[in-house]
């Protein structure tokens, strides 16, 4: 990782950050380099030596590990290494048979250098060792090979390495690394609508979605145990604010909403309040705080939707009409994404009174931070100015570096990548639409290449997106997408209903759900479905157990792909060098047919010797296989994937 330009590199607490530099000097004297690594408070946190990569490239490398969130800085310092120069010279000259007289200056120079090392030593024993080696170099009563013996031992060389003598130190510019807490690097999200939990509907054929009972935060608080049992660690809520009544949408995005229709949570604001208020049917602030507190007890974090847009009756519309775009006929422009129209939403115009808008949106964000929300999923950030997000995120993190932001930006690649560069902690991706092995491998490699600044979060579904793959693939298709999302990236999430195989579109060719929860209540029988065997919940629970137990799955940069002779099978692995934990996944991407064929593994990526076999333990079925470089697999709709733990033979 090399931080370049005005924007900092990105990392997370506990992550190994690679720093490389080109280091050289005139002549033949030895050079060395180190990194001065400083914490957000400016305190020196480490002095790491760089190591040459070899091959005549003059490239040097080391790794640093941040221990807390915030803006860390580093400088690379290159310097002449007189002791390394001396070691090389004395060994070459002694091997050439030069006499003691010819080496007199060299021996004295070495003694003086070792005396300087002794001054730097932190213990008397170390200083004594360096001084003894210097004394030997001056001992004219013995032959030269014996005089230099002690100075060439690994113990003395280690002293020279740990207490380097640095000459002509040259420092690089100061680079910045924006470090998020560990949850930015590794997380499992579960999204649900609080208003649907505990909701009940009237059995009325003329109005099947009319609510008899609206779900509350009290109901949602009880539902947290279900989310915890599934193994997730982030519970994400769509907007929880009052919903506008003007132009309110009815079921399936209709324009003729009835008075009893609930509307879209993203149409924020009414006479009951705006972005700083809570929908009264959900409860009050005390109910929300109780929800957050219970989540914390269950070791869950609450992520809240940050959607900076307004319903036509939001208080801002009357208090600050200049914050919106007025059309020639005097009306305010509503949101559009042709052919979609959002008559119930007014977008903010950041060109009008940016100072006022910036200040108000920061106030709103900090209000929820102070209510215990440390993660925000940001709705459509690509429709707002980049400099606004850079300013908002940095402003929040100055006081609360633990706060994380997930960019929901299904837009052009350049914008998605730039949002990551300017500060978003995680990013939605195109994973939802990558449904063949070739597409997914190409995309995975692209994301690994961008891992220095972009952390992908894989979602098989969202309230807005029901991909065609899930519409026609049944239980097997949902299982496949769950395996791929949870195993390929350390951050992934699902929208509730995924585990119940909800896959019916509002119409052929659409990615909108039939009876979308965005516009009406969707109570679900979660536990009954499990009892009837009609839920993917047990499988998802197992996937999350595997994720927690295997450090290899907590990182992105270690994603590696292997080859399969069957174009319907994808093969990838992850290996954690610290724990030597290795996971190998072989997954069919065909939910309807049996897929079989040979897979060919890059054994070096698995940490396996090319001449030996290894045991592949299936973490789903419990079966063990003796595998090598080439292996035959057969996957079917009942067992579409293997998730192997790799056990090397001693």
Image (cartoon, rainbow, N blue to C red):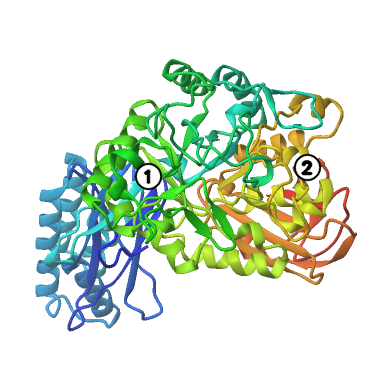
Give coordinates of residue 370: x percent, y percent: 33, 27
Q: From the image, state whether disc 2 or disc 1 is nearer to you.
A: 2
Please report whichever mark, 2 or 1, sits nearer to the chain's N-terminal start: 1
Q: Residue at x 34, y 46 (%)?
A: 66
Residue identified by numbered label 1: 180
Depicted 130 relative to depicted 313: above or below: below
Question: Badge 2: few (under 14), some or many (20 or more) residues near its Cα, within 10 Å?
Answer: many
Dot 2: element: loop
Residue at 35% from the left image edge and 42% from the top image edge: 317
Query: Dot 1: few (<14), some (14–19), or many (≥20) neighbours within 10 Å?
Result: many
- Name the residue nearer the viewer: 111 or 14: 14
Left or right, 232 with respect to 108, comes to right
Quarter that holds the N terminus: bottom left
Instruction: Find numbered disc 1 in the image and state the secondary structure of the residue it sits on.
Output: strand
Q: Quadrant of residue 136?
A: bottom left
Q: Position of residue 218 (x, y in %)?
A: 56, 16
Q: Residue at x 49, y 31 (%)?
A: 240
Closer-to-camera residue (356/388)? 356
Q: Which mark, residue 272?
A: none
The residue carrying mark 2 is 501
Mark 2 → mark 1, Cα distance in angstroms: 34 Å
Q: Is residue 528 left or right of residue 390?
A: right
């Amino acid at each position: 990782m090399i931080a370049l330009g005005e924007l900092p590199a990105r990392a997370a607490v506990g992550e190994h950050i690679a720093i490389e530099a080109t280091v050289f000097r005139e002549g033949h004297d030895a050079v060395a380099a180190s990194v001065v690594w400083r914490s957000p408070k400016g305190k020196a946190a480490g002095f790491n030596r760089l190591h040459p990569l070899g091959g005549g490239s003059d490239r040097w490398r080391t790794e640093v590990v941040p221990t807390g969130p915030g803006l860390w800085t580093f400088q690379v310092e290159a310097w002449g290494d007189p002791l390394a120069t001396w070691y090389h010279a004395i060994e070459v000259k002694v091997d050439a048979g030069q006499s003691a007289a010819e080496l007199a200056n060299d021996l004295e120079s070495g003694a003086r250098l070792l005396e300087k090392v002794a001054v730097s030593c932190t213990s008397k024993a170390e200083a004594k060792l360096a001084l003894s080696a210097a004394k030997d170099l001056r001992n004219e009563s013995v032959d030269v090979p014996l005089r230099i013996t002690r100075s060439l031992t690994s113990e003395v060389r280690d002293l020279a390495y740990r207490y380097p003598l640095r000459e002509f130190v040259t420092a690089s510019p100061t680079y910045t690394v924006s470090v998020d807490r560990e949850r930015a690097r590794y997380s499992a999200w579960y999204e649900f609508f609080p208003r649907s939990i505990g909701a009940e509907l009237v059995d009325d054929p003329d109005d099947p979605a009319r609510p008899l009972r609206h779900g509350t935060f009290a109901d949602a608080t009880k539902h947290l145990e279900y989310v915890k049992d599934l193994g997730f660690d982030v519970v994400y809520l769509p907007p929880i604010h009052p919903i506008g009544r003007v132009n309110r949408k009815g079921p399936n995005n209709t324009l003729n909403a009835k008075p009893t229709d609930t509307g879209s949570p993203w149409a924020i604001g009414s006479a009951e309040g705006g972005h700083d208020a809570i929908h009264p049917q959900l409860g009050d602030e005390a109910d929300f705080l109780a929800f957050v507190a219970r989540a914390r007890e269950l070791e869950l974090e609450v992520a809240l939707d940050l959607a900076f847009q307004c319903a036509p009756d939001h208080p801002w519309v009357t208090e600050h009409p200049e914050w919106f775009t007025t059309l020639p006929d005097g009306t305010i422009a509503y949101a559009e994404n042709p052919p979609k129209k959002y008559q119930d939403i007014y977008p903010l115009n950041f060109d009008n009174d940016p100072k006022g808008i910036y200040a108000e949106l920061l106030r709103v964000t900090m209000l929820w931070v102070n209510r215990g929300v440390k993660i925000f999923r940001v709705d459509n950030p690509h429709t707002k100015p980049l400099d606004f997000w850079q300013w908002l995120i940095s402003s929040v993190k100055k006081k609360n570096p633990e706060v994380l932001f997930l960019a929901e930006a299904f837009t052009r690649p350049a914008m998605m990548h730039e949002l990551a560069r300017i500060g978003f902690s995680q990013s939605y991706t195109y994973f939802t639409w990558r449904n063949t092995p070739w597409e997914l491998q190409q995309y995975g490699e692209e994301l690994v290449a961008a891992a220095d600044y972009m952390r992908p979060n894989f979602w098989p579904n969202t309230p807005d997106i029901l991909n065609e793959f899930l519409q026609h693939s049944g239980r097997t298709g949902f299982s496949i997408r769950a395996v791929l999302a949870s195993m390929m990236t350390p951050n992934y999430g699902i929208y509730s209903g995924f585990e119940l195989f909800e896959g019916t579109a509002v119409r052929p060719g659409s990615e909108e759900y039939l009876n979308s929860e965005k516009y009406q209540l969707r109570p679900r029988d979660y536990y009954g479905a499990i009892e009837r065997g009609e839920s993917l919940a047990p499988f998802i629970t197992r996937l999350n157990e595997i994720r927690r137990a295997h450090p290899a799955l907590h990182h992105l940069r270690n994603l590696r792909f292997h080859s399969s002779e069957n174009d319907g099978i994808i093969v990838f692995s992850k290996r954690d060098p610290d724990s030597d934990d290795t996971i190998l996944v072989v997954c069919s991407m065909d939910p309807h047919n049996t897929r079989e064929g040979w897979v060919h593994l890059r054994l070096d990526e698995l940490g396996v010797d090319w001449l030996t076999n290894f045991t592949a333990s299936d973490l789903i079925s419990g079966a063990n296989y003796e595998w090598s470089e080439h292996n035959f697999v057969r996957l079917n709709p009942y067992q579409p994937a293997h998730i192997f733990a790799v056990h090397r033979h001693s």
